[in-house]
Amino acid sequence: MSDRSVRISRAHWDALLAELADAQRQRHLVTYRALVERLQLPAPAMQTLTAALEHLAALDARAERPLRSALVISQGASRLPRPGFFECVARLGRFVGAADGTAAASWHAGEVARVFEYDYTSLH
C-alpha cells in the first residue's frame, strides 16, 4: 500500500475501506477533505489519501470490480473526482477521454452506479 514514498498505515487503510463501505451503503459520495478529516491522516494527508485511493483503484481494476475510489469527489461545483483520478483510471484501462469533460462526468456517473450495486462484502 504505497505510492513511491507515501505510505498509509493498516489502521488508516481499514478506516478508509470502512468509510467507502459506509458511503456505498448510504448511496452517497464523500469529499477528499471529509475523508482526510475523518481518517485523521498525518501530513501529507492529501497525498496519502490520493495514493491510497489509486492503490484501491488498481486492486479493484485487477479484480474486475467497480472502482470504489469513484465515490470520492472534490468539493467543487463539478462533484467529480480530481483530474488525477481520471488519469489513474485511464492508466488502468478503465476510462478514455479528457479528465474534465462530459465524457469524464458520464463515465463517473456510470461507475458510481456500478459501485452502488456491487457486493463488496465478500472481500472482508
Image (cartoon, helix red, strand yellow):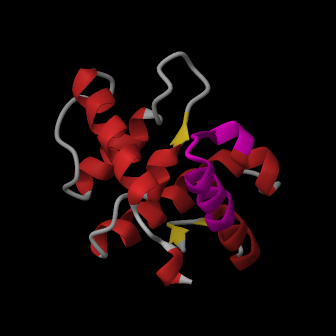
Q: Nearer the viewer, residue 121 or 106?
A: 121
Q: Picture coordinates of residue 68 (x, y %)?
A: 46, 57
Task: Decide whether the magenta segment is chiefly helix, strand or loop.
Answer: helix
Q: Picture coordinates of residue 22 (x, y %)?
A: 66, 57
11 is higher (above) or lower (below) than 84: below
- Left or right, 88 with respect to 32, comes to left
Asked if the magenta segment contains residue 28, the reply would be yes
Residue 8 appearing in the image = no
Residue drawn 47% across and 20% down? 78
Residue 12 appearing in the image = yes
Q: Nearer the viewer, residue 1 or 105?
A: 105
Residue 10 location, quadrant: bottom right
24 is higher (above) or lower (below) than 8: above
Residue drawn 53% across and 15% down? 77
Q: The C terminus appears in which quarter of the rendering?
A: bottom right
Q: Picture coordinates of residue 89 (x, y %)?
A: 30, 51
- Left or right, 95 with respect to 53, comes to left
Residue 110 location, quadrant: top left
- Left or right, 99 with respect to 78, comes to left
Q: The N terminus appears in which quarter of the rendering?
A: bottom right
Q: Which residues are magenta?
A: 17-34
7 is higher (above) or lower (below) than 114: below
Q: Picture coordinates of residue 9 (x, y %)?
A: 71, 74
